[in-house]
Amino acid sequence: HLIIFRRNQSNRRKYTQKTLPTTSVSPNAEERQSNMLREDSPLSVRTLRSELLSYWESITNDIKTQIENMHENIRRDISSLREEAKADNNTLRNELSQKMTVLHDTCAATTATQKEMERALSDASDKIMAVEKAHQTLQKDYHKLHEKFLDLENRNRRQNLRVVGIKEETEGGNPSRFMAEFFFDVLGKENFESPVVIDRAHLTLVPKPRAGERPRMMIVRLHYFTDREKILQLSRNKGRLSYKGSPVHIFPDMSPEVSKLRASFNPVKVKLRNAGIPYSLFYPAKLLITVNNTKYSFTDPQEAEKFIKTQTQSPNPATDREG
């Protein structure tokens, strides 16, 4: 028998055993064959070793070839991935660069706008401060001028009187002469040393009232201030006044602003009269209250009402005076 190693197409060895005919083998060949078949024959060991080495080299070469092929494939894949990653990075870098450029331009425009707005705000703030200062100055000047105007207006009215309650068309065609006789009739001619000189007299400039409505007031301007003061003093001393059976009232003529301020003390004056507390109302609107020979002055009606509530004294004869 002879063991023959053959290599197939896939580089794998096949072991085949053939039996040689005895007729074709010489005695020496048979001896060699028997020596090869013996396990401890040197020839058999060398042959097997040679075949094993050859087989090992073949396997090693196959493994190396496969490793090289895998390495090449991996290298190509890595190279392809690298190129793709590089291309993606370039695309991303370009997109980011474009967006960064747009963002930078937008930021620059926003910064410029912000600086412009800050400058405009600073200018506006300065202008507002200047306007506020000018407004304060103008406001002070206005108050001064307004006070002067009110003072001049009331000085111009200081010789005027307002008479309420005279029936319509009673004055006839000469209101000045009528009012001179009116003061004599109402206050008593004996209280005047000389005739009352009246510069002019007229009804208030409002529409003529209908039947049953309140008659218009009469505005009287006296020539002498002393006559005005005397008429007011006599009307206060006499109390209730009447003319031909109709109640009449005599008041000093003042500007609407001062009249409004003085009218705000009317509820306080009613409480003072009911409590029997003497008081006086001075120009323009200053209330003077006398309690236990102590005088208290008020320019705010609410403060005066608070003061009245704190008083628990017994009622005294109330006297009032306005000037």
Image: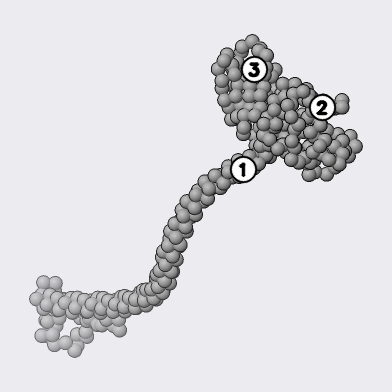
Mark 3 / mark 1, whichever is N-terminal? 1
Q: CA distance from mark 2 to mark 3?
A: 32 Å
Residue type of the residue flagged with mark 2: Asp
Residue corresponding to mark 2: 185
Q: Residues within 10 Å of mark 1 (few under 14, many from 20)?
A: few
Instruction: Measure the C-alpha gap from mark 3 to mark 1.
Output: 33 Å
The reply to whether residue 257 is visible in this rendering is no
The residue pinned by badge 3 equals 277
Q: Give the number of the mark in front: 3 or 1.
A: 1
In this rendering, the answer to whether 5 lies above or below 281 is below
Query: Element type at marker 3?
Result: loop
Left or right for 42, reference 155: left
Q: Name which residue lies at 72% across and 31% down.
A: 251
| Nearest to the observer: residue 95 or residue 235 | 235
- Is mark 2 in CB contact (under 8 Å) with mark 3? no
Q: Pick the residue in front: 21 or 61.
A: 61
- Label 2: element kind: helix
In what quadrant of the picture does the N terminus appear? bottom left
Relative image position of residue 317 (x, y in whole percent) = 68, 14
Mark nearer the viewer, 2 or 3: 2
What whole-number distance in Å separates the C-alpha atoms at marks 2 and 1?
33 Å
Left or right, 221 with reference to 173? left
Please provide percent x and percent y for residue 314: 64, 10
Q: Which residue is mark 1?
A: 152
Q: Nearer the viewer, residue 219 or 137?
A: 219
Q: Amino acid at mark 1?
A: Leu
For residue 172, which quarter of the picture?
top right
